[in-house]
Image (cartoon, rainbow, N blue to C red):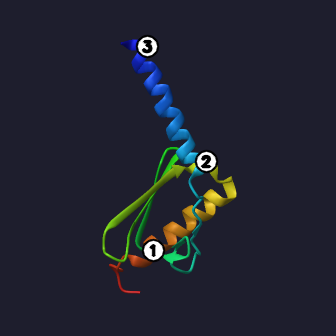
Amino acid sequence: MAATLSAASVLYGAWLARREARRIPRMLVWPVDGAPYLDDVELRDVRLQKRGPLAFLQWRNDEGRIERLSWWGDTLSAHERRELTLAAAGAHRARQPTTMAP
């Protein structure tokens, strides 16, 4: 029984690896002073979370449903990680109402 399950898990892992390798890369563009775009589509209600080496992006699509994307943050260079963090922080600050008079 164990040999059958191990063979099945190896085949399933190979199938998953092939499927992921064939997946089309996605392009995230997040300017500091504008709205982020994913594959040339503007994202609404965007939130970026970083948990250790992982990065999670959450947004609402045109139908109002929540979509998510996750990836290893270290796939970006240190400069790109810093740019992404600054752009996300700038967008998050802009959405929050001020609590004090200017």
Tell me: residue 94, above or below residue 11. Answer: below
Cα separation between marks 2 and 3 = 36 Å
**Real-space Cα distance between discs 1 and 2?**
23 Å
Query: Which residue has dot 1 on it?
Result: 43
Return the residue at label 3: 3
Q: Residue 99: image x %, image y %? A: 32, 78
Residue at the location (55% across, 39% down)?
A: 17
Q: Nearer the viewer, mark 3 or mark 1?
A: 3
Mark 1 / mark 2, whichever is N-terminal: 1
Which residue appears at 46% of the width and 33% of the height? 12
Across and down, in percent, residue 42 comes to 48, 78
Q: Sequence order check: which comes first, mark 3 or mark 1? A: 3
Q: Residues within 10 Å of mark 3 (few under 14, many from 20)?
A: few
Image quarter (top left, top right, bottom left or bottom right) of the C terminus: bottom left
Q: Residue furthest bottom?
A: 102
The residue carrying mark 2 is 74
**Amino acid type at mark 3:** Ala
Q: Quadrant of the N terminus?
A: top left
Amino acid carrying mark 2 in the image:
Asp
> Decide: marks 1, 2 in contact (CB < 8 A)?
no
